[in-house]
Image (spheres, grey):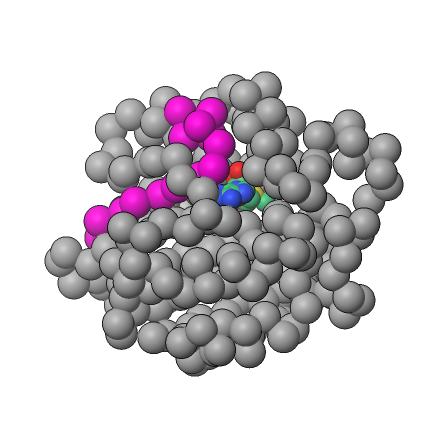
Amino acid sequence: MSEELRNQLGVKEDQPNDWFETLYSHTSESGEGVPWANMAPHPIFKKWLDGQASVEEGKKALVIGCGLGDDAIELEAKGYKVTAFDVSDSAIELCKKRFPNTQVTFVQADLIAGIEKWYKQYDLVLEIFTIQALPPKYEKALIKNVADLVADNGTLVMITEVQYQQRTFENGPPWLLNKNYVESFEQVGLKKVFNSNDQEPEMGDEIHLTIFQR
Ligand SMILES: C[S@@+](CC[C@H](N)C(=O)[O-])C[C@H]1O[C@@H](n2cnc3c(N)ncnc32)[C@H](O)[C@@H]1O
């Protein structure tokens, strides 16, 4: 991405969260102007979830960087007790407006800072395109902070695009991950149990569905 476009969006390496609030505060429940807003669950995630056995009562799921909330609603329909967070207050307000009757807890929180009270609290953690929405210098902290949310015997479901070239601030956003993200998760206590990259990527060289377990 050119420096001009980054400046237009207000993307700053040292204040990487701010432009999301700007973007969401200028949209409505339609999601117009939010480039990633499908207004539907991610199709790769939905296909995976539909293929899973029914969920035992009381199982807890957490959606990271939930955007406009559709993936969280899908997990609720499957039977999870769901919390979903995003760094943008406006995104969270839009989720509450879009889904007034849901039991999902939509809440503002910052993945870069990490969320200590949720340490190992979730049976299923869902991460779609959030790490790649933040500059490479935060990668190590983000991967640790995502892994820390997964309960003992819990599962991390991740959908991410992968690029073959090295990640640099100048190339993004998005800052698509390199393939070594799998080892990085394994270094912080998770184990890869499944990986597929058979779908057409939108932006990068590959798109992965990867499942990790603790
Ligand atoms: C590329 S969007 C993906 C949204 C959603 N997961 C989807 O697939 O449609 C990245 C999301 O992460 C959120 N986000 C960015 N930085 C964050 C942070 N530090 N903590 C939590 N969420 C963040 C953004 O506001 C945005 O909703």
The image position of residue 69, as x and y in percent, is 41, 38
Q: Is residue 66 above or below residue 10?
A: below
Within the magenta stretch, is there residue 80?
yes
Q: Is 16 positioned to the left or the right of 155 in the image? A: right
Does any portion of residue 107 appear in the rendered image?
yes
Q: At 29% from the left edge and 25% from the top edge, which residue is drawn?
A: 100
Residue 21 percent across, percent down from the top left: 55, 28
Of residue 23 and residue 108, the one placed in the foreground of this image is: 108
Q: Residue 176 location in percent, x, y?
A: 68, 58
What residue appears at the point 44 percent right and 73 percent down from the top-left corner?
188
Q: Where is the C terminus found, in terms of image quarters?
A: bottom left
Q: Quadrant of the N terminus?
A: top right
- Residue 154 is one of the magenta-drawn residues: no
Where's residue 87, x and y in %? 47, 37
Q: How many marks?
A: 0
Left or right, 118 with reference to 39: left
Does any portion of residue 124 appear in the rendered image? Answer: no
Picture residue at 69% right of the left edge, 54% below the top: 175
Residue lying furthest front: 14
Q: Nearer the viewer, residue 52 or 142?
A: 142
* Horizontal side of residue 154 vs 58, given as left or right: right
Q: Is residue 49 above or below residue 134?
A: below
Q: Residue at x 43, y 59 (%)?
A: 146
Magenta segment boundaries in residue numbering: 76-93
